Image: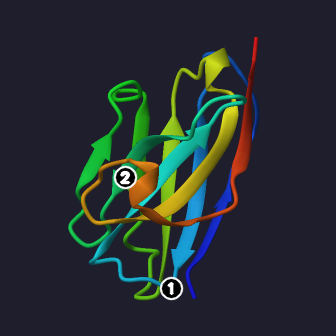
Amino acid sequence: EVQLQASGGGLVQAGESLTLSCVASGFSFEKNDIVWFRQAPGKEREGLACINIHDGSKYYRSSVKGRATISTDYAKNTADTVTVHLRMNSLKLEETAVYYCGVERIGCSLQTSTVTYWGRGTLVTVSS
């Protein structure tokens, strides 16, 4: 059974940073990527970053490249469960959204159509 548990959301001020975490299990880390998306009020869900645990490759949406870092702690991961983090720096008001982690078929397309499993989101509110 695929399980994805996102955490770390909260209230931050514009310009501050936040690190989100996703605990993932129940699927092949070799054949899939772990992704972070977000959905702002009234907007479509958009992909932010992805990582392949097996080979460590990463990919970022151009609009967050340089401010977002996706990572995993290989020393703490097990064969069955991994934790993936997304650190967002210099957060903007318009980045208030529910942030989701998910499982995507390998390829880092960051398209909702290629995400096969979604976790429950975690709300990030950026205030002025």
Q: CA distance from mark 1 to mark 2?
A: 18 Å
Q: Quadrant of residue 61?
A: top left
Q: Quadrant of residue 27?
A: bottom left
Q: Residue at x 56, y 40 (%)?
A: 45
Q: Residue at x 27, y 78 (%)?
A: 30
Q: Earlier in the sequence, mark 1 or mark 2?
A: 1
Q: Residue at x 51, y 61 (%)?
A: 102
> Eyeballing the image, is 54 above or below 38?
below
Q: Check disc 1 and give the amino acid type.
A: Gly
Locate residue 69, reporting x and y percent. 40, 41
Locate residue 47, reporting x and y percent. 45, 42
> Which is more toward the observer, 117 or 73?
117
Q: Which residue is mark 2?
A: 50
Q: Is residue 87 left or right of residue 94?
A: left
Q: Which residue is mark 1?
A: 26
Q: Which mark is residue 80?
A: none
